[in-house]
Amino acid sequence: MLVIGASGVIAQVNEAARLLMAGAAPGEPATGAVPEWLARAHRRALTAQEGGGPLGPACGPVGDRVFEAHPVHADGERVVWWLVDVTGRRQVTEGPRAGHDWNSVMVEAATELLSSLNLDRCLEMTVRLAVRHLADAALVVLPLGRRRYALTYGDGGDEVVREDLSVDPREVPGLAEALRGFPPVPARWSDLAGAPGWVARDGLGEAGRVVVVALPGHGLPSGALVLLRRSERAGFSPEEEEFAELFAARAGTAISVARLYAEQAAITETLMADLLPPVVPRLDGVALAARYRPAGDGERVGGDFYDVHPVAGTREEPLVVLGDVAGKGLEAAVLTGRIRNTLKALLPVADDHRRVLDLLNGVLLSGDRKRFVTLVLASIERRDPGLALRLTSAGHPPPVIVRNDGRVEAARTQGTLIGMLEPIDSVSDTVLLAPGESCLLYSDGITEAMGGPLGAEMFDEERLYAELAHCAGMPAEALAERVLMLASQWVGGGEHDDMAIVVISAPRSAPDADDPAGA
């Protein structure tokens, strides 16, 4: 028995405690005189006393024995610790893990490890399972390249620590060989006292043992599992050795799969960035808005696309492109990316819409002729006080002009689709927009949306034009949102094609500050 005050100074020690801990004496600081696990338990007991919470026993090694320390508050400032030797009980219940159903444990491990493809969660579960069934603490080491390693450490507490550090695996016997994986090396125990600080963490104790187990992956090692035990549990029983090998195989496979998935997800995200609809840029003197809705609710890309190029051609006029690739889903999106990159390369000749379409047609005809694309090009010229649009359609629904007086007009442009026949034919149209007037470019996913009261009727152009007649003078953002909302409400929860919308508007002049009446 020993009594420790709130200041951390030992107040009283009986003879048994003095024989057990040579440095423990009245008036001595507890830190350094008693084991670190007992000093930590005393600090927790003081905190629990202040908060009125319950006190629980602590457990840890003292020399080559294991003790449970039971706290009792003597008064408001001191804690009495009764130490009970539980070495024999721990050896029976935990030494060889007697009575452990290793088959059930392996099923538990497989279920936990394969329940997620998230790499961080997989590493965390590997550490927690290893501490739960094999060790007092565990560390997973994954090579990152350039002598850096991802370390995941746990000792049975609530928190699992993750770090990316530059360490030398040769400091731990067997770790460098386990990380290489070839040739396979057996598990090898070494003294914990000689391990570096990134392995032997605070709280585990100076005495103890450490073993390194390779984590096999798919043809290459996934990393290594470092198991740490205190001195009273010096090694594995035969059952534990067999389980450790099986566990490492399962954990290595799970980590390898999760890591591969993470790498593929990162690659997909990078490639997908070029296929996603772009952010519409701000253009001086032009109001632009765009909306996009892919065919599938879980999809991010499809066969419809749009692009806004602020500078194109020798005139350096903005160019808006809206297109629709035959089909939908990922295959259509791949062709969409190819078309968008080709059109970007053709920007220097964008003054001549016919030439751009001819060159794009040649590129598509040189590849797979099973797919084609319809396009509409819109070059924007600023003409005070409004805009002049040069519009060219290639097999695409003609753009729609919404006038200030409510008139709705279709641009007089038409042409053959791209990627099927040669040569192509196209007719351009020039449209003037007064301030407040808009031009709507849209894909046929809007007009061919199936739905309505009976769920089997197309939205069609007539209904679109009738709705646009009520949108005179509406800002570009509001008009784009309105059209997409109408089409989405029409289809409801039914299937639909990709939908793409771009609105080009001539902004209204800002009111003169010196003209209150005009304002």
Image (spheres, grey):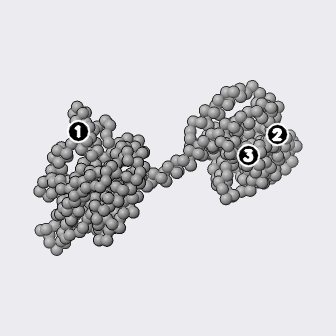
Residue at 77% across, 27% down? 98
Rendered image quadrant of residue 101: top right
Q: From mark 3 to mark 2, how far is it between C-alphas?
A: 25 Å
Q: From mark 1 to mark 3, how far is it between C-alphas?
A: 62 Å
- Where residue 243 appears, as percent x and y from the top left, is 73, 33
Viewer-proximal residue among 322 and 451: 322
Q: Amino acid at mark 3?
A: Gly
Pick whichever of labels 1 and 3 is earlier in the sequence: 3
Please give the residue where the numbered disc 1 appears in the rendered image: 458
Local packing at callout 3 (Cα closer than 10 Å; few below 14, some 14-19, many 20+) is many
Residue at 56% across, 49% down? 263
Rendered image quadrant of residue 171: bottom right
Q: Are marks 3 and 2 in contact (CB under 8 Å)?
A: no
Please give the residue where the numbered disc 2 appears in the rendered image: 234
- Where residue 483 appears, as percent x and y from the top left, is 24, 48
380 relative position to 249: left or right: left
Please give the residue where the numbered disc 3 appears in the rendered image: 181
On screen, residue 111 above or below 475:
above
Residue at 29% across, 71% down? 315
Pick whichever of labels 3 and 2 is earlier in the sequence: 3
- Where residue 513 appears, as percent x and y from the top left, is 19, 72
Q: Is residue 95 visible?
A: no
